[in-house]
Image: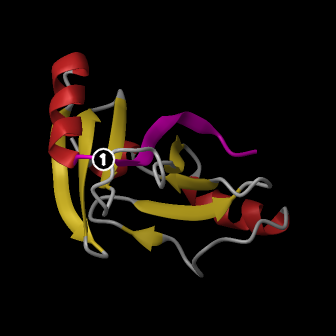
């Protein structure tokens, strides 16, 4: 059994990255932890250490509707990371990558649930961001 310590983060698209950072900062005290570009889309990780993190990707078109806005994946922080890959394989779970993705301060495994929702399992809460 995979031992979950906490829901680690939620990854989702937003209409306006700066507006969303201000919104979650003002209401929940989330702080910006990291920022970058991926496939031409700006993103930021915001949150509170050991509480919750959001990874926000700005939607590429400027329409003000919900088309294309969705949760990309959710992540769990787990206790037994080194055992998980074999457990997933033993249960017939197909992972997205041949080996764990190595981040600056953590490793992650990615796969889908039966309905197609992407799940990330990380060894360190918030990818080791603090």
Most extreme residue toward the bottom is 98
Location of residue 30 (image quadrant): top left
Q: How is the image coloured?
A: secondary structure
Most extreme residue toward the top is 27
For label 1, count other residues whose C-alpha is less than 10 Å away and answer few (under 14), some (14-19) or many (20+).
Answer: many
Q: Position of residue 79 (x, y in %)?
A: 55, 43
* 76 sits left or right of 12 in the view: right
| Residue positioned 23% across, 17% down in the render | 27
Quadrant containing the N terminus is top right
Location of residue 91 (image quadrant): bottom right
Q: Which residues are magenta?
A: 1-16
In magenta stretch: residue 73? no
Q: Position of residue 59 (x, y in %)?
A: 33, 57
Residue 106, compared with residue 101, is above or below; it is above
* 115 sits left or right of 104 in the view: right
Q: Position of residue 123 (x, y in %)?
A: 46, 52
Q: Which residue is mark 1?
A: 15
Q: In what element is the residue under mark 1? A: loop
Quadrant containing the C terminus is top left
Viewer-side residue, 63 vs 89: 63
Residue 52, compared with residue 103, is above or below; it is above
Most extreme residue toward the right is 91
* 8 sits left or right of 96 in the view: left
| Residue positioned 34% across, 38% down in the render | 53
* 38 sits left or right of 102 in the view: left
Q: How many marks?
A: 1
Residue 34, compared with residue 21, is above or below; it is below
Predominant secondary structure, magenta span:
strand
| Residue positioned 61% across, 74% down in the render | 96
Q: Position of residue 55 (x, y in %)?
A: 34, 48
């Amino acid at each position: 059994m995979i031992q979950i310590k906490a829901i680690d983060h939620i990854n989702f698209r937003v209409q306006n990255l700066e507006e969303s950072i201000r919104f979650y900062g003002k209401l929940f005290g989330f702080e910006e932890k990291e920022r970058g570009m991926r496939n031409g889309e700006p993103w930021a990780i915001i949150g509170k250490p050991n509480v919750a993190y959001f990874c926000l990707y700005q939607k590429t078109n400027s329409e003000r509707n919900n088309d294309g806005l969705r949760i990309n994946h959710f992540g769990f922080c787990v206790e037994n990371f080194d055992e998980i890959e074999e457990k997933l394989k033993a249960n017939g779970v197909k992972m997205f990558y041949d080996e764990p993705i190595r981040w600056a301060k953590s490793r992650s495994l990615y796969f889908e649930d039966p309905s197609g929702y992407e799940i990330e399992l990380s060894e360190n809460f918030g990818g080791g961001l603090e």
